[in-house]
């Protein structure tokens, strides 16, 4: 997965070079609304955009919103660069890595943030009878993450170091979130890092939490957001502003209406109602937290995820 993501970023860079002569003007629908296509992962984190569309927040800004599901950053970044998507949802480290490789990508709005307090919506889990009790006990062990050299292993390493362990002496392996609980049960790995709803499912099967690694980084850590290219922003300033207003309204509404978030998730995922009712939700807010983003960037450089400190002024709105 990491090799695939890296190759996709490299391909996106070549595509961007080929496309830098200019883009097409946004299309309009029969009612005069601007057609906007957004690539998102069909997970709990993207509930606000689905809720905002249902509530008419984008229509209020004369935006004819089309939501297209993707498998993650490996598809979202090239999709935005090539123009297949006007905007897409991606985690902050993926965009930092893209910028590190020369891709002029920028966040337009926030997307999802850590829960701010225990429990969070993601954690490192171990079997109930595991000798691993705290993050430093992960030293010398094998831990699964969904992508190598990304936000998962970066924040887990930080949690280990904060607990007094050696963050370099951990073996990370790639296991997709849906497959991670089974890998833990079969003892193919010593620990797994998973997000909801897979976290709740694993806990129900007897796993326990070692660390909420996002919270170990910062209670205000921003996890992902909606982004596009610098060129698109320059050429479509009014549209970008309208999209940002609608998206920010969607984020704030989702943050204040938890029952509706749980309900809307059932319309675009296969998560059943009992699971939706008990899973931990992330925080949805429109404002980015600069200090925690800066800390994440510094830690990513320290552990080799990035080659240089990210330029947050260029990356954030």
Image (cartoon, grey):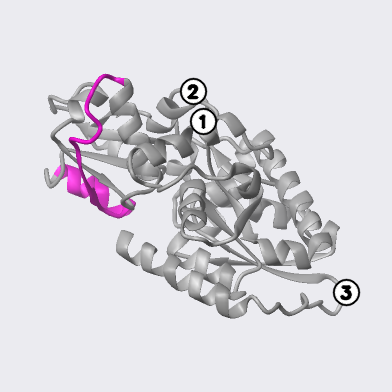
Tell me which segment is drawn in magenta.
Answer: 163-185
Residue 148: image location, x then y, percent: 31, 51
Does the magenta portion include 167? yes
Report which quarter residue 232 is drawn in.
bottom right
Q: Mark 1 points at which residue?
A: 115
Q: Which of marks 3 and 2 is nearer the N terminus?
A: 3
**Crowd tier of the residue under label 3, counting other residues whose Cα lies within 10 Å: few below 14, some 14–19, many 20 or above:** few
Which residue sits at x=48%, y=27%?
218
Which quadrant holds the N terminus?
bottom left
Answer yes or no: do the residues labelled 3 and 2 have beta carbons within 8 Å? no
Separation of disc 3 and disc 2 at Cα?
Answer: 44 Å
Which residue sits at x=80%, y=61%?
237
Q: Name the residue under label 3.
A: 32
Q: Name the residue under label 2.
A: 117
Report which quarter residue 133 is drawn in.
top left
**Crowd tier of the residue under label 1, counting other residues whose Cα lies within 10 Å: few below 14, some 14–19, many 20 or above:** many
**Callout 2 secondary element:** loop
Residue 105: image location, x then y, percent: 59, 58
Q: Can residue 72 be seen in this view?
A: no
Does the magenta portion include 139? no
Answer yes or no: do the residues labelled 2 and 1 have beta carbons within 8 Å? yes
Q: Is residue 81 visible?
A: yes
In the rendered view, tell whether residue 135 sits above or below residue 19. Answer: above
Separation of disc 2 and disc 1 at Cα?
Answer: 6 Å
**Callout 3 secondary element:** loop
């Amino acid at each position: 997965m990491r090799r695939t993501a890296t190759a996709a970023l490299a391909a996106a860079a070549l595509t961007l070079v080929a496309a830098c002569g200019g883009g097409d003007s946004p299309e309009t629908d029969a009612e005069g609304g601007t057609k906007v296509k957004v690539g998102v992962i069909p997970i709990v984190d993207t509930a606000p955009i689905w809720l905002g569309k249902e509530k008419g927040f984008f229509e209020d800004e004369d935006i004819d919103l089309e939501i297209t599901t993707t498998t993650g950053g490996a598809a979202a970044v090239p999709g935005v660069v090539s123009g297949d998507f006007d905007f897409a949802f991606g985690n902050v480290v993926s965009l930092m890595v893209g910028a590190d490789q020369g891709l002029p990508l920028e966040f337009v709005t926030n997307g999802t943030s850590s829960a701010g307090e225990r429990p969070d919506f993601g954690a490192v889990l171990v079997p109930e009878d595991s000798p691993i009790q705290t993050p430093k006990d992960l030293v010398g062990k094998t831990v699964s993450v969904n992508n190598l050299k990304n936000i998962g292993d970066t924040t887990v390493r930080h949690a280990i170091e904060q607990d007094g362990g050696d963050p370099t002496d951990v073996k990370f392996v790639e296991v997709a979130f849906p497959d991670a609980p089974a890998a833990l049960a079969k003892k193919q790995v010593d620990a797994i890092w998973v997000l909801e709803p897979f976290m709740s499912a694993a806990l129900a099967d007897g796993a326990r939490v070692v660390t909420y690694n996002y919270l170990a980084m910062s209670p205000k850590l921003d996890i992902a957001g909606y982004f596009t290219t610098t060129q698109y922003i320059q050429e479509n300033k009014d549209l970008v502003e309208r999209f940002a207003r609608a998206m920010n309204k969607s984020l704030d509404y989702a943050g204040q209406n938890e029952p509706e978030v749980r309900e809307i998730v059932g319309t675009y995922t296969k998560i059943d109602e009992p699971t939706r009712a008990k899973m931990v939700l992330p925080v949805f807010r429109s404002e980015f937290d600069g200090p925690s983003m800066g800390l994440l960037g510094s830690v990513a450089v320290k552990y080799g995820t990035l080659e240089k400190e990210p330029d947050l002024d260029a990356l954030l709105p």
